Amino acid sequence: MTGPIRATIVGSLPKPGWLAVPGILQAPWKVPATDLPEALADATRLCVDSQVAAGLDVVTDGEQRRRHYVWGFLDGIAAIDAENLALKPTRGQRFRKEAPVARLTGEPDCPEPRLVEPLLALRALTDRPVKVTLPGPMTIVDSLLDEVGRHSTADLAMIFAAMLNREAKALAAAGAAVVQFDEPCFNIYLDDARDWGIAALERASAGVGTKTGVHICYGYGGSEVADWKAANRDWSHYEQSLAMVARTDIDQVSIETAAVGVDIGVIELLRGKDVLLGLVDVGKEAAETPDQIADGLRRALAYVAPERLFACTDCGLVLRSREAAAAKMRALAAGAAIVNRELGAP
Ligand code: ZN
């Protein structure tokens, strides 16, 4: 770090072409099961190297070990079938009528945290602070077809929140600098977020013992999401979702402003929080310039102290090419460096 403003990414990075088909979500592994652990370790190393080479201050494992950001947590939980998928209306049918989801076939349970070993492997690759992302409870239950019907959606979210809390505490104890919960659904189901989603997030993040974050966005950079963003005119969701999150003990909030019509001034609602400001459009290959990143950061400084400001992506970079992702990360770090120098940093 060479100044108060730091640079980081939301979480995911593209997978190498030898590991999974690039450019699609939930791509199957190309590598046979016997070679998969070694391949995942190699892919993780490449991701760390690219983040460090770009100059990012907080790094992730690029979510290389999970085929999907939600399923990566659901894999291995009892009574979850993430192989034989079902179709379900998800995300308020904002992007498509139905999406493939995992199925809940009994009482969900995971006796032990399962993400500590991957975290230790990540920490062995870098001295920089590392962030681990987990799906938020509301987004988990939206991404799951409950075939049992024993619990209300809100109660089911609380069950997952308790599991997430155990995992988050274990990750904190194992040295994660940040545990981030991904809750794109907070910008969709505003009433449910108010009724139980925020409570579930607070349950998941209570007493974690390291910095906690929440990522709220308008979706990945796929074509259906891009079409929705191009047609949408109402960008008021953050005015409600960020106001709700502002009242929690969550330390960091990651939001999207590059690919959408959101005014950066909305971060005024986040006083006292670290702001991970999305200044990189994850839906297009062309990289932002350092000057574009610097412009966004300067505007944000009207609302947030530089020590609390992070130059960040809008969402995960999983759908981009590796070259584009690297260029966008370099722009984030270079843009932060420009503004840090203006602030008097060496
Ligand atoms: Zn996102």
Image: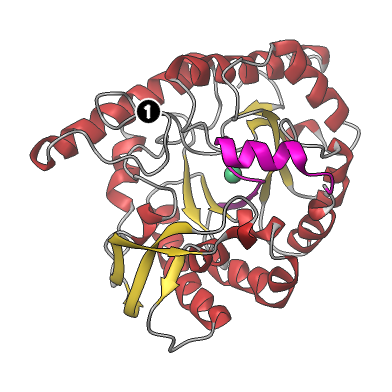
How packed mark 1 is, by other alpha carbons closer than 10 Å (few <14, some 14-19, many 20 or more), is some
Residue at point 73%, 60% (across, down): 245
Q: For the C terminus, which image quadrant? A: top right
User: Magenta stretch containing residue 220, yes or no?
Assistant: yes
Residue at the left extreme? 34
Residue at the front extreme? 97
Three-letter code, disc 1: Pro
Is the residue 248 above or below the residue 212 in the image? below
Is the residue 46 above or below the residue 182 in the image? above
Q: Residue 23, image x and y in percent?
A: 43, 29
Residue at image mark 1: 22
Is residue 342 left or right of 85 when viewed as pictured? right
For residue 308, say whether it is visible. Answer: no
Region rendered in magenta: 211-234
Under circle 1, the secondary element is loop
Q: Residue 153, image x and y in percent?
A: 54, 79
Q: For the N terminus, which image quadrant? A: top right
